[in-house]
Image (spheres, rainbow, N blue to C red):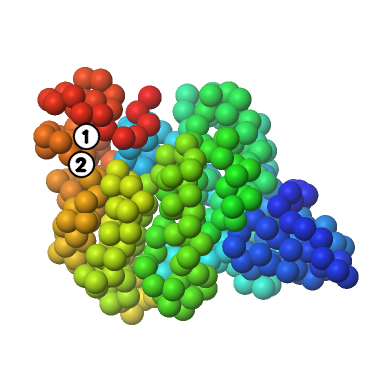
Amino acid sequence: MIKDAVLYRHLKKDYVQCTACEHFCAIAPGDMGKCGIRRNYNGALKLVVYGRPAALHVDPVEKKPLFHFLPTQPILSLGTVGCNFRCQFCQNWEISQTGPEFDPARSRNGDELMPEDLVALCRRRGIPMLAFTYNEPTVFFEYAYDTAKLAHEHGIRSVFVSSGFESLAALEMIEPYLDAINVDLKAFTDQFYREVCGTRLKPVMRNIEHIARRTKIWIEVTTLVIPGLNDSEAELRDMAAWLASVSPDLPWHLSAFHPDYLMLDRPPTPHRTLIRGWEIGKEAGLRYVYVGNVYDQTRESTYCPQCGELLISRNWYRVAVHWREPGVCHRCGAQIPGVWR
């Protein structure tokens, strides 16, 4: 379904400027933005994949990853085709990476699923939350917004799994209906963002800080650690120090890379690199640092930062909660930041 966009402004000669993300694409009539799914139809911007998820699955919320948000609960996850990033290592490239020849009619997967269909599915199956994920939810903003707003009316939570390149206008519009977000902090140099992802670092940093300090959206951050590109101790220290300055309670997930898409020339991330990153995060003052995509039950579990008691044990997606009251350490009574009920 083709749907009118809400985040754009008119320019001269029927050009439009999309304002959903920080690319702020100026789009000629008949053309699409960098995401490949927001097209200018005679001076009006439209989303061409509304109601057309390319992937739809029920996941554990820990897979997003969100470790401080309704642990052990299922989440309905969906994404469309298209993306505003061009990450050479993309692990969902089959649906997210579309070229200039993109034809939405050939990319549809299954039947249309309107916001009311997704909410009805959650209600029917007792699923308490929705995740907009797999590709960047900002590029299908109108579909995500309408779904999140309707879900909110029925007490269903909404989550973004995002690269963090939203415009402030997009964040402000979705904020009342967005309960949590996991933002990819892909590296801590602008060179990496420009050369490997085709974007910029500063808007991502601004958005992480904005969400953490100025909204009620629960936020966690993930970094895919890539050998030889963003895994130096100096870069990890800079990243950890900055995250701790935003908030020492900001959970940081360090995830193992595996070769994919256009980046097949690098090895998987050694476990020892992730362990060192975990140590660096702790040394910087972050209270909740996690290791992912490898077997490490110790470093993917949650402990009380005050007394060290094990609060949530994780073994991949086998999760056990040990406290008696959600969000409260059963040994010392410390309050653990997060959304627990």
SS category of the residue bearing label 1: strand
The residue beneath circle 2 is 301
Q: What residue type is labelled 2?
A: Ser
Tell me the residue at 44%/52% (across/down): 209
**Relative to 304, residue 136 above or below:** below
CA gap between label 1 and label 2 equals: 6 Å
- The picture places residue 99, in percent across and down from the top left corner, at 62, 72
Residue 159 visible within the image? no
Tell me the residue at 16%/62% (across/down): 276
Q: In which quarter of the image is the C terminus?
A: top left
Tell me the residue at 21%/51% (across/down): 285
**Relative to 306, residue 65 above or below:** below
Place residue 318 in its image quadrant.
top left
**Relative to 68, residue 298 above or below:** below
- The picture places residue 321, in percent across and down from the top left corner, at 23, 29
Label 2 crowd (10 A; few <14 / some 14-19 / many >=20)? many
The residue beneath circle 1 is 312
Task: Please name whichever residue, 282 or 96, is drawn nearer the observer in this view of the structure.
Answer: 282
Relative to 182, 274 lies left or right = left
Relative to 91, 266 lies left or right = left
Label 1 crowd (10 A; few <14 / some 14-19 / many >=20)? some
